[in-house]
Amino acid sequence: MMMLPVNRTSALLLTILTQIKALHHTQQVHAKVILHGLQEEVLLGSSLTNSYIQSNRLDLAAASFHRIPPRKRNRYSWNTILSGHSKSKNHRESLRLYNLMRKDCNVDSFNLVFAIKACVGLGFLENGVLVHGLAVKNGLDKDGYVAPSLVEMYGEFGRVEDARKVFDEITLKSSVLWGVLMKGYLRYSSDSEVFRLFYLMREGGLGIDNALTLICLVKACGNVFAGREGKSVHGLSIRRGFIDQSGYLQASVVDMYVKCRLLDDARELFQKSVDKNVVMWTTLVSGFAKCERAVEAFDLFREMMLGERVLPNQCTLAAVLVACSSLGSQRHGKSVHGHMIRNGIEMDAVNYTSFIDMYARCGNVQMARKVFDMMPERNVISWSSMVNAFGINGKFEEALGCFGKMKSQNLTPNSVTFVSLLSACSHSGNIEEGRKQFVSMTRDYGIAPEEEHYACMVDLLGRGGEIGEAKSFIDNMPVEPMASAWGALLNACRIHKKVELAEEIAEKLLSMGSNESSVYVLLSNIYADAGMWEMVNSVRRKMGIKGYRKPMGLSAIEVC
């Protein structure tokens, strides 16, 4: 066979490299390159490097790149290997190669973007600022690729003002650039700023030609529970044709509906989705469980595992345990526990704590304690859950002992710990200990009482018959009393038949816009207990006029 001239051989091999995709074909061409002694040619070496990157063989790509003599490497060859490391999120090596490259050739928009991404991936803000300075020096800071990367970098590091400065210096702002800025504000600033940026973008005459802007908007709607606005964004994404193109946008809309408690809308979109991954399933299961639609949460979980064959993760199982707790279904909780053990799913602190809570709410405090003892590491949250487990099951001494052991482990209790402890005092009627712990919370640990702590104290005093002290406690609160505190006192009035005070509290709760139906029902029960049947009829007439109905009382019991 006649040997082709070197330049013709190189051209032929380059042509072949542009047409092949399989790894073994690339390796065959590579063998020909070595056979003809062409491995030091920069164009062939760069093309081989790129082919290996496309085949996800970064090791072979790096070997091919390093065979190119340093004196022959150009910006194309450097950018090729940098793109491979950037694509593989090998940020440390990417930054190292970028610094080596600067000794051989000048920067351009491509390698600057790779360097910026590496700085973000490594958390190196100072290096990112240096790259920004180099971009300014070379007149590339307003480049269509570099500018969005700089805005995103500052947004990722929470430097939204710096991101805004870079943004404001750009004359022609694309909708992608607006979306990148919104993403930064969404993470580290206010949701209202995201909406303001969107309106500014529309006032500037820009349309929406990417999914990122819509994702930021729909997430902002979810964060502020703006369901109506979220529906508008969903409609906009349908009209622009993005909802069917972006699985991440679909997942964001589902998450928004769940946060806004629009569960039927969430399920409708979910059912239309092509890519029903474990994250979307978990979002939906968790939403139904938290919104007290536990049966439907279980149905979704069964469909996920048996119908769609999607394996749950730790977050999915934690969500299902919330449903188990709300139903008081220890049998279902045990089946989830068994599934995790059989399938070797490693449990984290959240899962252990969820099991403790589930077993405790199902009345099996012994099993809750067993799970607690199995934990390899216990944090403040897990200890607080165990204190709560004893408390809600009427085991005050054990709850107090658990709290003491927690402190002996040099763990500092937090606000959640004291909610659990005060609740235990309330369940046991131990007023003195409750007073002592409430004072200790602020005095010894510097924890400012929150709404739940005040409500626990009012409930404790009210249940114990100290109605006057409970009322005085509310009147002397350093903050405006919330509905939970007044509601606890109203319930105490029902227990101890304090009709006049109950009327006063009910009027206050109604003026606060509290759940009117539950207030009317409780007030009706107080009148009934006192034998004031005319007042009972009067309250029920008001409920009828307002369209309220007494909710059906339900109890959960598991038949084994």
Image (tube, helix red, strand yellow):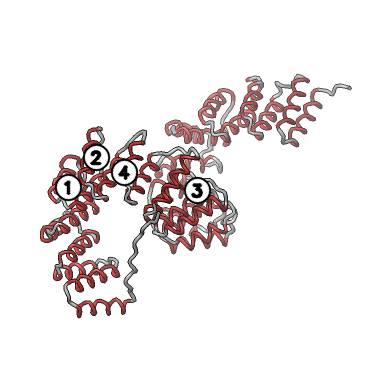
Separation of residues labelled 1 and 3 (CA atoms) = 40 Å
Would residue 496 appear left or right of 146 to someone viewing this image? Answer: left
Could you tell me how many numbered marks the image carries?
4
Q: Nearer the viewer, mark 4 or mark 1?
A: 4
Separation of residues labelled 3 and 4 (CA atoms) = 33 Å
The residue at which mark 1 appears reads as 438
Whole-percent x, y for residue 410 in the image: 24, 32
Q: Which type of secondary structure does the marked residue at label 4 adopt?
A: helix
Q: Amino acid at mark 4?
A: Gln
Q: Is residue 396 above or below residue 123?
A: below
Q: Nearer the viewer, mark 2 or mark 4?
A: 4
The residue at which mark 3 appears reads as 279
Whether residue 185 appears in this view of the structure is: no
Q: Is residue 468 above or below residue 47?
A: below
Whether residue 136 appears in this view of the structure is: yes
Separation of residues labelled 2 and 4 (CA atoms) = 14 Å
Would residue 12 appear left or right of 373 to someone viewing this image? Answer: right
Q: Which picture quadrant has residue 488?
A: bottom left
Whole-percent x, y for residue 526 in the image: 20, 70
- Give the mark nearest the N terminus, 2 or 4: 4
Numbered circle sitting on residue 402: 2
Would residue 465 appear left or right of 230 to someone viewing this image? Answer: left
The residue at which mark 4 appears reads as 366
